Image (spheres, helix red, strand yellow):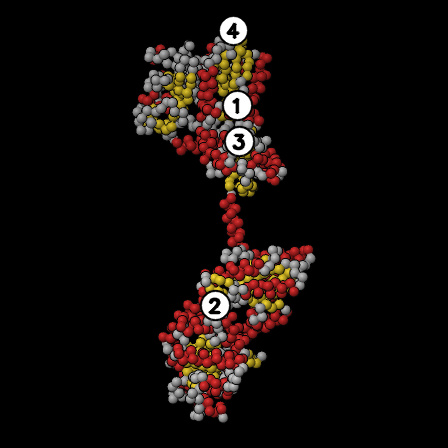
């Protein structure tokens, strides 16, 4: 084939050179890049010719300089001018035209039938700059490979039009022996060589890898390299190759791009890419047709397309692309795993097949929305759906929809995430938020929510009575401390299960905290229904349960409140049931129905609490002293200091009323400190007045709260130091409850008291079931026999079992104390018969109305001053 020695020059730097004869002596003749019936023309937007290669002049039999003074349309035959004008308008509008045929007039008057294809030339800002066209003589034989490669080179050259002028693109063709066959004019601006100077050089002399190794010319991926310039400089470049298979030979086209200003290039390329993406998204139907054509050239996919494919395949979630008809056109590997389908089973199938049957009636409407108008409703949004696997199983998925443009037109990229684990965690969080972690029952939050629901329904649809049972386990703390928290937890779980067994499915059983439970009975007929459930619960809870080889039996106290009108709030109802439960526990009734009087009593109790706080601050609660008598000598042994409160408006308030109130309201600490100080001051004063009473002591009661809350030791140390009282004249009376509520704290406190020579009395001995257990666990010095046993003592027992039993209990307690070396005090001695029995049984000390009630400090001094034994004096 004829060798072409001409070269094409343009403002873009695109040209092709053919080597001269002297440079081909070692090469076989071959097809040059532009040795085909191709003419490359550049015009402005109006169609005036700015540049062309010599091939056009040869085709038209005209002078090249003359051609550049005319419009291209001036060479078009009249009947084809309208078609040519339409093609010019189309390329300006759409950026490219399809190939079209026209006739051109030659200088000698003959016609040349040609095929023309046009592209719009734009600058780096995306603005139209001119028009490129390829004109092919249709009458000449066409080498398809050379033609397509020339088209590809021109298009690639246009891609670099937006680069800065100081970053030219060098283009070389390299033969199979790695010798340079041709070069464009831009190579001189890039490397300083003229194009002719490079012809015949070995490519590796000009370009190597950064490490100096030869570059593989067959590689198709762009790679970094180093080019040696004419002045000896080494220039970092990006090298890419494109293979050209001609009829006779194989050539490679090499592109060299300057990377010295890489940062500026990246910014320019990024800006161009963003503009291009915006431009592509706004393309019309003609762009879609062009995309269809380009889609067939899969071998020439761009780097961005390849990266997109890699990203899709490596995405950690399922991805598929759905066209406008709802048909799947692309899936990734993760989606195959997610749904259990092979890729070929999904491509071409409707997306509806990936959702359950029940959702398919809804899905088309939603699909229509996000396919026909995706930007309005679905852009960037995500929704939870149910997916359907190939095996028919369903699983929760999160679907994200984003509109995209493909070669086939508008489509939707669907992102699918398996949210099975997320749903499980959410369900667990909901369960944790609204259910008790130990028993699994609804917690207080969910219980109150159900109450609110019932109350709202009553106001909206008419009231249906319902009942609330507030339940508290009796003596649970004793079991928890005695047998351990593990056993206590197991007991709570068992009690929760029993409560559920005693209720209907529509009722709600909840754990409100600790050992408190609540039952919500929906739609009861009246109080009798609630009472029936309460009795059933009490009977079931009373059944013994075996826990870690321990037979445990427990009871409960239940408060019942009825909602008979829609006016009661849930908080009021829960408060009423709590009040009723408190009454049931106080009176040991098992259950108690709420009535309005309870509220009145609660208000009264609140007022009493306020008055008591004021009385403590004003020291209106004072100590009275009841003498404790030696039953052997009849003389004074000591006093028990007892708190007495004379209310300004209500008169005397019983200690049985205000002491528990002080414990419940947290005032017992403040009250205890005041009474400790008063008792020690008084005993210190008596010791100074009556020094001969060397063994006289004062006994002070200690609340269980004072023991369990800590600070008792420090408070006693301060009082003893302040008053100067010898600790051996002070006794502290502690109830069994104080030991039960916090065994570890009680043990520590009692041993600290023992170190200070303070004697410890176990008050009300015999009433608690575990009292004997405390005698070896705690440093107890004195046992006080509870007045309930002393009251039933009688000198004449006979065969009356009811009289013998209290006698035997008191006898056993006294005998036990003598064996253990403990002192015994009998309280509540009121008649001579009781005194005589106690003396016969060997009881050491006694106190009660037989000797004296509790009296004020001034009156108590007479027990020091009376010389005859008090026992004889009171019996006379």
- Please state if 290 lies on the left or on the right of 256 as rendered: right
Mark 3 residue element:
helix
Q: Nearer the viewer, mark 1 or mark 3?
A: 3
Q: Which residue is mark 3?
A: 345
SS at mark 2?
helix
Q: Nearer the viewer, residue 438 or 794?
A: 794
Q: Tell me the residue at 54%/42% (across/down).
A: 396
**Residue 556 appears in which quarter of the rendering?**
bottom right
Q: Residue at x 53, y 82 (%)?
A: 799
Q: Earlier in the sequence, mark 2 or mark 4?
A: 4
- The answer to which of marks 3 and 4 sits earlier in the sequence is 4
Q: Quadrant of residue 461?
A: bottom right
Is 164 left or right of 403, judged from the image as shown?
left
Image location (x, y in percent) of residue 765: 47, 76
In front: 93, or 746? 746
Q: Residues within 10 Å of mark 2 (few under 14, many from 20)?
A: some
Q: Earlier in the sequence, mark 4 or mark 1?
A: 4
Question: How busy is the neighbourhood of tag 1: few (under 14 within 10 Å), some, or many (20 plus)?
Answer: few
> Residues under labels 1 and 2: Cα distance?
86 Å
Distance between the alpha carbons at the discs numbered 1 and 3: 26 Å
Q: CA distance from mark 3 to mark 2?
A: 68 Å
Q: Is residue 46 visible?
A: no
Label number found at residue 478: 2
Pointer 1 residue: 293
Residue furthest to the right: 462
Q: Where residue 808 sits in the image (x, y, percent)? A: 48, 80
Q: Residue 845 — which label? A: none
CB within 8 Å, label 3 to label 4 = no
- Identify the residue at image location x=52%, y=6%: 108
Q: Nearer the viewer, mark 3 or mark 2?
A: 2
Q: Residue at x 53, y 7 (%)?
A: 110
Q: Residues within 10 Å of mark 3 (few under 14, many from 20)?
A: few
């Amino acid at each position: 084939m004829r060798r072409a020695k001409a070269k094409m020059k343009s403002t873009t730097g695109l040209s092709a050179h053919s080597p001269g004869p002297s440079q081909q002596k070692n090469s076989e003749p071959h097809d040059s890049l532009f040795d085909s019936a191709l003419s490359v023309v550049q015009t402005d937007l109006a169609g005036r010719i700015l540049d062309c290669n010599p091939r056009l002049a040869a085709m038209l039999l005209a002078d090249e300089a003359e051609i550049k003074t005319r419009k291209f349309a001036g060479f078009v035959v009249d009947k084809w001018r309208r078609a040519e004008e339409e093609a010019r308008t189309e390329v300006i509008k759409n950026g490219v035209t399809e190939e079209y045929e026209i006739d051109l007039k030659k200088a000698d008057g003959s016609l040349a039938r040609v095929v023309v294809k046009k592209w719009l030339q734009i600058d780096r800002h995306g603005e139209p700059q001119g028009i490129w066209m390829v004109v092919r003589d249709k009458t000449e034989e066409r080498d398809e490979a050379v033609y397509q490669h020339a088209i590809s080179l021109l298009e690639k050259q246009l891609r670099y039009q937006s680069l800065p002028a100081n970053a030219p693109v060098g283009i070389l063709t390299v033969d199979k022996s790695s010798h340079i066959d041709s070069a464009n004019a831009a190579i001189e601006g890039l490397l300083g060589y003229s194009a002719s100077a490079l012809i015949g050089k070995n490519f590796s002399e000009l370009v190597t890898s950064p490490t100096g190794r030869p570059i593989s010319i067959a590689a198709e991926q762009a790679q970094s390299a180093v080019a040696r310039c004419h002045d000896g400089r080494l220039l970092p470049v990006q090298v890419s190759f494109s293979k050209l298979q001609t009829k006779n030979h194989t050539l490679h086209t090499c592109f060299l791009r300057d990377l010295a200003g890489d940062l500026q290039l990246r910014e320019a390329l990024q800006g161009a890419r963003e503009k291009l993406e915006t431009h592509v998204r706004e393309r019309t139907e003609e762009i879609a047709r062009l995309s269809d054509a380009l889609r067939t050239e899969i071998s020439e996919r761009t780097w961005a397309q390849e990266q997109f494919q890699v990203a899709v395949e490596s995405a950690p979630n399922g991805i598929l692309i759905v066209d406008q008809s709802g048909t799947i056109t692309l899936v990734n590997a993760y989606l195959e795993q997610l749904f259990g389908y092979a890729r070929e089973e999904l491509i071409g199938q409707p997306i509806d097949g990936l959702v359950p049957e029940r959702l398919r009636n809804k899905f088309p409407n939603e699909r229509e929305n996000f396919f026909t108008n995706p930007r309005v409703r679905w852009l960037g949004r995500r929704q939870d759906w149910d997916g359907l696997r190939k095996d028919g199983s369903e699983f929760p998925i999160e679907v994200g929809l984003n509109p995209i443009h493909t070669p086939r037109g508008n489509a939707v990229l669907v992102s699918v995430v398996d949210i099975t684990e997320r749903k499980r965690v959410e369900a667990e969080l909901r369960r944790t938020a609204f259910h008790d972690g130990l028993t699994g029952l609804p917690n207080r939050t969910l219980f109150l929510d159900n109450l609110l629901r019932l109350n709202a329904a009553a106001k909206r649809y008419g009231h249906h009575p319902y009942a609330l049972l507030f339940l508290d386990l009796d003596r649970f703390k004793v079991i928890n401390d005695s047998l351990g928290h593990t056993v206590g937890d197991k007991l709570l779980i068992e009690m929760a299960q029993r409560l559920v067994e005693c209720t209907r499915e529509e009722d709600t059983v909840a754990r409100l905290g600790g050992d408190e439970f609540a039952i919500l009975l929906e739609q009861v007929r009246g109080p009798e229904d609630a009472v029936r459930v309460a009795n059933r619960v009490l009977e079931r809870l009373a059944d013994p349960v075996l826990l870690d080889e321990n037979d445990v039996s427990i009871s409960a106290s239940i408060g019942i409140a009825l909602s008979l009108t829609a006016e009661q709030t849930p908080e009021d109802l829960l408060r009423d049931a709590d009040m009723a439960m408190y009454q049931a526990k106080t009176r040991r009734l098992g259950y108690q129905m709420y009535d309005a009087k309870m509220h009145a009593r609660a208000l009264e109790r609140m007022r009493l609490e306020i008055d008591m706080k004021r009385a403590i601050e004003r020291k209106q609660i004072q100590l009275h002293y009841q003498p404790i008598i030696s039953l052997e000598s009849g003389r004074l042994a000591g006093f028990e200091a007892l708190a007495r409160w004379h209310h300004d408006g209500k008169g005397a308030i019983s200690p049985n009323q205000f002491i528990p109130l002080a414990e419940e309201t947290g005032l017992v600490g403040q009250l205890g400190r005041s009474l400790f100080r008063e008792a020690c001051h008084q005993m210190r004063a008596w010791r100074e007045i009556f020094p001969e009473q060397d063994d006289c002591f004062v006994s002070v009661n200690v609340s269980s709260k004072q023991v369990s809350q800590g600070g008792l030791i420090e408070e006693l140390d301060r009082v003893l130091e302040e008053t100067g009282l010898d600790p051996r004249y002070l006794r502290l009376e502690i109830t069994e409850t104080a030991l039960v509520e916090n065994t570890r704290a009680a043990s520590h406190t009692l041993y600290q008291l023992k170190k200070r020579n303070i004697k410890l009395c176990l008050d009300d001995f015999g009433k608690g079931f575990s009292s004997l257990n405390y005698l070896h666990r705690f440093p107890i010095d004195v046992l006080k026999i509870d007045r309930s046993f002393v009251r039933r003592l009688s000198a004449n027992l006979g065969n009356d079992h009811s009289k013998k039993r209290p006698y035997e209990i008191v006898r056993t307690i006294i005998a036990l104390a003598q064996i253990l070396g403990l002192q015994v005090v009998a309280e509540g001695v009121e008649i001579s018969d009781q005194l005589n029995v106690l003396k016969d049984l060997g009881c050491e000390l006694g106190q009660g109305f037989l000797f004296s009630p509790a009296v004020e400090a001034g009156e108590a001094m007479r027990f020091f001053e009376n010389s005859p034994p008090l026992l004889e004096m009171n019996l006379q």
